[in-house]
Amino acid sequence: MRHKNLMELLEANPLLTDEDLALTLCVSVGTVRLDRALLGLPELRERMRRMAEKANRRLRSLRQEEVIGDLLELEPDHLALSYLTTSKEMAFRHTGIVWDHYIYSQASTLAMAVVEADMVVTGAARVRYKSPAHVGDKLIARAKVGVRKGNKNVVSVRTRVADREIFVGRFIVVACLSETAEAEKL
């Protein structure tokens, strides 16, 4: 039963640490590690690496290095997931609060990455910062594609730190024709 619960928890949220799993399952961290080994489940770092490799193979609209944060999941024209660990270089010197443009950049590039096209740009955005992020926080951004009209896509992005939502954005992402494609049309 515990093994089944462990599998279900990791399927629902592959970013759970062994400590998180131990708390949820009411067992020791050692028991979680042993169970993972018996079930052939990799540790968090390896799970993230595998997710990133799979997601980056599907990435079309941006290059991997252009995405702010680590792209962990990508279902083109449907949803995407990104992970960003904040550092002191991203924060105001005296407060430890992360600058808003890092949070926005993660969300914006994720919104562009989820749209399957050779070239995309952000046409408009409506964003709301609900709570600050601090140095060391792990930002999890989820993008979901909504309405599509022609070459315009509405993409909603929500960013969380643990169970606290810190950012909500609604982006209009426009798929552009490349210069080559436009020339071929003429």
Image: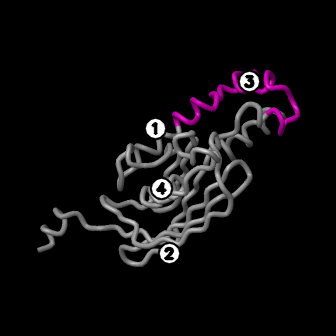
Q: What is the CA distance from the residue labelled 2 to the residue labelled 1?
A: 28 Å
Q: Which contiguous range is marked in magenta?
A: 22-50
Q: Is residue 94 inside the magenta stretch?
A: no
Residue 174 sits in quarter: bottom left
| Three-letter amino acid code of the residue under disc 2 | Val
- Of 159 and 176, the residue lying toward us: 159
For the N terminus, the quadrant is top right
Q: Which residue lies furthest to the bottom in this view?
A: 149
Q: Name the residue under label 1.
A: 53
Q: In the figure, residue 172 lies in which quadrant?
A: bottom left
Q: Name the residue under label 2.
A: 147
| Secondary element at tag 3 | helix
- The numbered mark at residue 33 is 3
Q: Residue under circle 4?
A: 105
Q: Residue type at mark 4?
A: Ser
- 146 to the left or right of 42: left
